[in-house]
Amino acid sequence: MSKLKKERGGVIIIELVVAVLVGLAAGAGAGYVMRKSTAEKQIGSAEEEAKRIIKAAEDRGEAAKKEKLLEAKEDVHRLRQELDKETKDRRNDLQRQERRLVSKEENLDRKLESLEKKEEVLSAKEAKLDKSQAAIHEMHEKQKTELERISGLTTEEAKTMLMAEVEDELKHEKAMMIKEYEQQTKDEAEKKARNIISMAIQRCAADHVAETTVSVVALPNDEMKGRIIGREGRNIRALETMTGIELIIDDTPEAVILSGFDPVRREIARIALEKLITDGRIHPARIEEMVDKARREVDQRIKEAGEQATFDTGVHGLHPEMIKLLGRLRYRTSYGQNVLNHSVEVSHLAGVMAAELGVDVMMAKRAGLLHDIGKAVDHEVEGPHVTIGADLAKKYRENKEIINAIAAHHGDEEPLTVEAVLVAAADAVSAARPGARRESLESYMKRLTRLEEIAESFTGVERCFAIQAGREIRVMVKPDKVDDVAAVGLAHDIVKKIEAELEYPGQIKATVIRETRVVDYAK
């Protein structure tokens, strides 16, 4: 019984399982049918929406196309109207020009007819005039024949006799007038020249102080003298060696005297010493640094002096190098007269005289300012300063009148312009002022310059300075080219050449200095 129940239970379970499976299969089939139906509906609505969108786009494109066609037609219509208007305007212009040309042709025809009538009248008058001239000529020939018969002379003979008499009379009168005018011109020219020169001198009065060869530097106290001298004199030796200027430290209270013939070196030494005194640190390295600074400062002062000279004289447009050369003249003297001051004075004098004579004032002032420009480099270039100055003017493109004035102010060339003559006269007037120049100073400077040139002519010499008023020449040599043994021979050779080529009082000491420096840095 229990076995039968178990079998029935198993059958029921199987039936239940089969029923569940059949139900699941039926549900899946129904779901599939429903999803398929839903998808078909969505596809159909999407296709309808796509058709609607396509139709709307086609409608909008058609409208845009019609709108663009309408705009294009309007543009074509507008352009056609503008073209018609422009064509009409051009046609009207052409018609107006055509009417104007027709009117001009009619006027020309009328003028041509008038000219033809005038030409006919002139031809008739010319024929009458020819007949009248022929009658006059015939009458003139009859009169000439009658006069020749009465006088017994031909026309040529009478003309020759008359010209001879007139010529004799004119020669005498001409000689008398020439003589009278020559004397009158000489008297007036001399008087006028004196007035012009005196007026120029009066309007350009200038004080002249002869340049000296010493400068004085004030000290804050006498203890500073010992610091300037340094241990065993090393500071003063370093300063004299680097500047070429002699320092005189004597009993003069609170003052040091700098002595040297070269004003540039003396100015460098003065500025360097003043800077050292102000700084308080005085030793060879500091001295070298201050000398370099002083040299740069003097170079700047030279430039400023040249610019100031051009400003004072009103001369503009000079080459920058010419302005620097002018500034160098501040430290150049000629017979004790400062060359830059002399050049400015010559410029003013020449300008005043040019104004009185009515010639080119600016050319005269420019030539006067540049006439001694060669003296700025005459110690570096061979030849007289006149030739050097003319070459510099050519190099920096001054005009030929200025070059001639520079070359002719000492008579080396013939002056080609009035301005050149005035520059020579102004130069003579400036140099001839009482106290303006001193011969001994120039000779002294030439001797010291020659002394340095002799020393520099030897191979291996780096720098040299004439000091002690020319009683000593210090020569610094290049240590890599001159050794200790050669330095002895060099000193002897310099002394022998000085004895052969220079005239000097007393004796001259030649000192050859050979220095080797070794510098290293701790890092």
Image (spheres, rainbow, N blue to C red):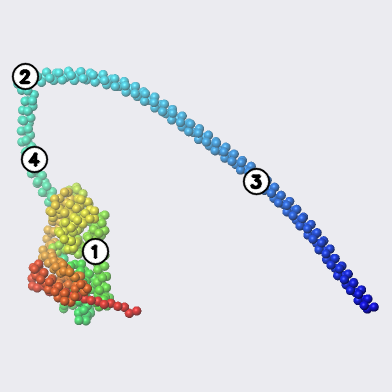
**Given the current orientation, which residue lies at the most extreme right position?**
1
* Rendered location of residue 420, percent (x, y): 17, 51
Sequence-wise, the earlier of marks 3 and 4 is 3
Q: In the displayed structure, would residue 486 be above or below residue 426?
A: below
Q: Which residue is mark 2?
A: 149
- Give the foreground label among 1 and 4: 1
* Residue 45 locus on image (x, y percent): 75, 53
Mark 3 sits on what residue?
A: 61
Residue 200 in sight here = no
The x, y position of residue 520, in whole percent, is 30, 78
User: Nearer the N terminus, badge 1 or badge 2?
Assistant: 2
Circle 1 sits in a helix, a strand or a loop, which is it? helix
Q: CA distance from mark 1 to mark 4?
A: 55 Å
Distance from disc 2 to disc 4, alpha carbons, whole Å, reads 42 Å
Q: At 16% across and 61% down in the image, what residue appears?
A: 382
Say the numbered circle drawn on residue 302.
Answer: 1
Residue 243 falls in image quadrant: bottom left
Q: Which element carries disc 4, helix, strand or loop?
A: helix
**Which residue is labeled 4 in the image?**
178
